[in-house]
Image: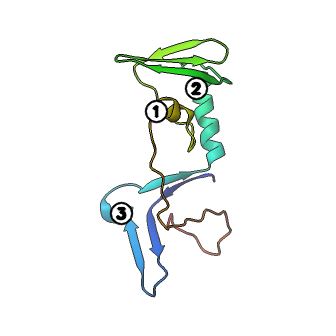
C-alpha cells in the first residue's frame, strides 16, 4: 500500500490544453519510477544497514573534515576518525560537509511548484 510503480505521468499546465504525458509502456520500460513513502524507505534502509556488514556511527556529529590528495579524514565529535577516498555530503540544503569542504551551491528559484498529497480516489488510478 505504501509503494507504487509509476506507469505513466500526466502533467497539466495553467493554459488551456497545456498537457504533457509520459508512458512506461510507450517507452518500453516496466515503470517510469516508483513512489515509496519516506518512512517505509528509511525503515528499509536502516534495517539493511543493521543487518549488513556495515559499521554504524549513529548517532554521531561531525566535528572536522580534512580533504587530501588521496583521501579525506572525517573527525567525529567523540574523537573517532574515519578515512576514505570518497566523502558524500548527503546532509541537506545547508550541508555541513559541503560548507566545510569549501564547495559552493548555486541555489536559485525556478518558478515551479509541486504538490504532494495523500488522498482517496473514486476510480483506480492505474499507476498514473
Residue 68 in percent (x, y) is at 39, 17
Tell me the residue at 52%/21% (across/down): 65
Determine whether the residue tagged by mark 3 lies in a helix, strand or loop.
helix
**Residue closest to the eye, 60 or 54:** 60
Res 119 quadrant in image: bottom right
Determine whether the residue tagged by mark 1 lies in a helix, strand or loop.
loop
Looking at the image, is mark 2 or mark 3 nearer the viewer? 2
Taking 28 as reference, is 126 above or below it? below
Tell me the residue at 42%/56% (across/down): 31
Q: How many labels were placed on the picture?
A: 3
Tell me the residue at 46%/45% (across/down): 105
Residue 43 in percent (x, y) is at 64, 37
Is residue 39 shown left or right of residue 86? Answer: right
> How many neighbours does mark 1 have within 10 angstroms: few (below 14), some (14-19), or many (20 or more)?
few
Is residue 31 shown left or right of residue 76? Answer: left
**Residue closest to the eye, 107 or 121:** 107
Determine whether the residue tagged by mark 2 lies in a helix, strand or loop.
helix
Mark 1 and mark 3: Cα distance apart in space: 44 Å
Taking 73 as reference, is 30 above or below it? below
Mark 2 and mark 1: Cα distance apart in space: 30 Å
Q: Earlier in the sequence, mark 1 or mark 3?
A: 3
> How many neighbours does mark 3 have within 10 angstroms: few (below 14), some (14-19), or many (20 or more)?
few
Mark identifier at residue 49:
2
Looking at the image, is mark 2 or mark 1 nearer the viewer? 1
Mark 2 and mark 3: Cα distance apart in space: 34 Å
Mark identifier at residue 102:
1
Res 123 quadrant in image: bottom right
Mark identifier at residue 25:
3
Q: Earlier in the sequence, mark 2 or mark 3?
A: 3
Mark identifier at residue 60:
none
Tell me the residue at 65%/75% (across/down): 122
Amino acid at each position: 500500500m505504501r509503494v507504487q510503480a509509476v506507469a505513466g505521468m500526466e502533467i497539466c499546465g495553467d493554459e488551456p490544453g497545456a498537457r504533457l504525458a509520459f508512458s512506461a509502456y510507450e517507452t518500453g520500460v516496466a515503470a517510469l519510477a516508483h513512489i515509496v513513502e519516506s518512512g517505509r524507505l528509511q525503515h528499509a534502509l536502516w534495517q539493511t544497514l543493521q543487518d549488513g556488514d556495515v559499521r554504524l556511527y549513529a548517532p554521531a556529529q561531525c566535528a572536522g573534515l580534512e580533504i587530501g590528495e588521496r583521501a579525506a579524514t572525517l573527525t567525529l565529535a567523540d574523537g573517532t576518525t574515519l578515512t576514505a577516498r570518497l566523502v558524500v555530503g548527503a546532509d541537506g540544503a545547508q550541508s555541513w560537509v559541503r560548507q566545510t569542504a569549501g564547495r559552493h551551491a548555486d541555489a536559485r528559484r525556478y518558478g515551479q511548484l509541486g504538490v504532494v498529497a495523500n488522498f482517496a480516489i473514486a476510480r483506480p488510478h492505474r499507476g498514473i
